[in-house]
Image (cartoon, helix red, strand yellow):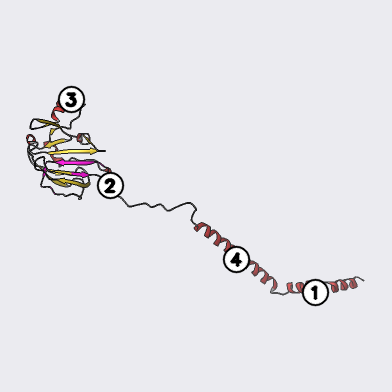
Amino acid sequence: MREDKNNKASQNQNPNQKENGQLQKKPWFWPVVYTGGALVLAGLLFGYNSLVSKVEEAPLPGLAEVDSGPVVETNARTENMMYPFKEESLSKVQILQEFYELEANEESRENALMVFNQTFTTSSGISIAMNGEEFEVLAAMSGKVLEVKLDAFTGNKIVIEHPNGTQTHYSSVKDIAVKEGDEVTQGQALGKATDNEWNQAAGVHMHFEVVEDGKYINPKKLLAF
């Protein structure tokens, strides 16, 4: 009876189920299944990695490249002002005329007055001499020559603008070695001190001025005399 039931059950099985069972018994069936599964998994991983790479490479929205602009030399911005003459000559230096300051004492104010044809003018710099001898005038800081004014009466004048916006003026100079537009380095020779008709009493000297923010300031505040 049981055999008859089993035979009937086997006869009633779906043909597709029989075919599946027969396929599963084939020696190549399961290796093929495993290989196919591995290929599908590899494909999924490759697709995921490609997607992640594209996301990482995509530029962030709302960000723009910043133009760094031209490179500007900044060494001169950190320079400290040096004497407008060779430092080894400091012991021979005489300040013939001071920078005029209202808050200075009476003696200093008088020493800051310049006289020509009985007309008094105040000094906007300091007049430097070395025992009446000629001396080499040097650039107090690096910069660009803005002006070279030739005037034998008041004395030839050199104006240099520096990267920090400061200007230095050198008057009563001869044998000028620079011209307008030249770039000069700190300590570079500009010419030689000489005399002039406007300030004959000073003899051979160089009048040195410093301008900051459009105003003349006392050079002695920047240099130790």
> Upstream in the sequence, badge 4 or badge 1?
1
Left or right of 19 in this view: 144: left
User: Between disc 3 and disc 2, whose residue precedes?
Assistant: 2
Mark 4 residue type = Gly
State yes or no: discs 2 and 1 in contact (Cβ < 8 Å): no
The answer to which of marks 2 and 1 sits earlier in the sequence is 1
Read off the residue under disc 4: 43
| Residue depicted at 16% across the width and 35% down the height | 126
Mark 4 burial class by Cα count in 10 Å: few <14, some 14-19, many 20+:
few
Of residues 119 and 172, the one drawn nearer to the viewer in this rendering: 119
Q: Which residue is mark 3?
A: 105
**Residue receiving disc 2:** 75
Q: Cβ–Cβ below 8 Å for labels 4 and 1?
A: no
Q: Nearer the viewer, mark 3 or mark 4?
A: 3
Q: Is residue 146 shown in magenta? A: no
Cα gap from disc 3 to disc 4, whole angstroms: 92 Å
Q: Which residue is mark 1?
A: 15
Q: Nearer the viewer, mark 3 or mark 1?
A: 3
Q: Amino acid at mark 1?
A: Pro
Which badge, 3 or 4, is on the more N-terminal residue? 4
| Image location (x, y in percent) of residue 110 | 13, 27
Which amino acid is tagged 3? Asn
Crowding at label 1, few (<14), some or many (≥20) Cα neighbours within 10 Å?
few
Q: CA distance from mark 3 to mark 2?
A: 38 Å
Magenta residues (range): 159-177
Q: Nearer the viewer, mark 2 or mark 1?
A: 2
Disc 2 to disc 4, how far (Cα)? 59 Å
For the point 16% across and 38% down, the residue is 208
The three-letter amino acid code for the residue at tag 2 is: Asn
Q: Residues within 10 Å of mark 3 (few under 14, many from 20)?
A: few
